[in-house]
Image (cartoon, rainbow, N blue to C red):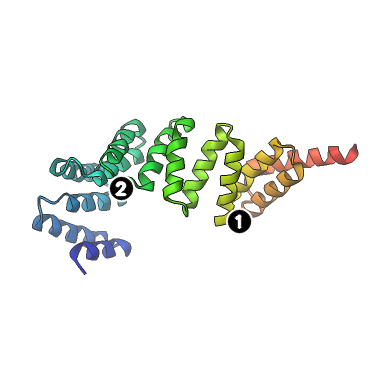
Amino acid sequence: MNKTETAIQYMQVKDYEKAAQVFGEIIQEHPDDPVGYINFGNLLTHIKEYQRAGQFFEEAIRLDPQAGAAYYGFGTILFEQEQYAEARKQFQQALSCGLEEGDVHYSLGMTFYKENQSRLAIPYLMRASELLPDDMDVAFQYALALAQNQFIEEAKEVFERVLSFDEAHSDAHYNLGVIAMYHDQVKAAYNHFQAALTSQPDHALASNGLKQAKLHLRHDNEQ
């Protein structure tokens, strides 16, 4: 096991002090290798020491202006501090450097989403979903962006995929209920709202949706 693997193991057991010590040794032994600075920056990000983390990512970029992982790390700390426009620049630079990974596309999409520009988020979330086909959270955010921009059928398909990961996902059930109501499929909507409340009894939106579905069903039965 090399020192990087040892440090990562310390991180996994939350012994951040020892992980920092080992990452520090790696930087001392290889001061011109940007990877050591990126790893130390990631550790500091994990423990929310964003200012120090930024210094390590900046040093990695100074050593290698094409270090995509450093731009991604820098973008992450800006994102965590709600500096979404600045974070977006870093994520775009990471892509420009060839870091074609699902997490980068997802993070880039979420910078738009956080600024209430969900339509602009869609292509990045779609690409993230393609690169991370087994990631439920990515799929859900992609479906949500589709639904918010009236891509109803596409959203329905992706919300159903979310349920294939977690059949009790309350928000996916709620949104499928809304889509079913949109199509006047009231019984299906009722079932989805009920499933959402079974998973999350305090889901206020699902509770309201269920009341509306009940009213529609009662009205249909009276006719």
Of the residues under marks 2 and 1, which one precedes in the sequence?
A: 2
Q: Secondary structure at mark 1?
A: loop
Residue occupied by mark 1: 167
**Quadrant location of the C terminus in the rendered image:** top right
Left or right for 216, reference 110: right
Residue at 32%, 63% (x, y): give it.
12
Kind of residue at disc 2: Lys
Query: Could you say where residue 201 lies in the image, as x and y percent from the top left?
Result: 64, 51
Is residue 171 something that shows in the picture? no
Residue at the spot x=55%, y=51% of the render?
Answer: 162
- For the residue marked with disc 1, what is the amino acid? Glu
Q: Residue furthest right?
A: 223
Q: Residues within 10 Å of mark 2 (few under 14, many from 20)?
A: some
Residue 96 point in image, percent of width and height: 28, 38
User: Left of 130 or right of it: where is 50?
Assistant: left
Find residue 92 and report its horizontal and vertical position in percent: 31, 36
Point 35% across, 39% down: residue: 79
Is residue 57 shown to the viewer in this render?
yes
Disc 2: which residue = 48
Secondary structure beneath label 2: loop
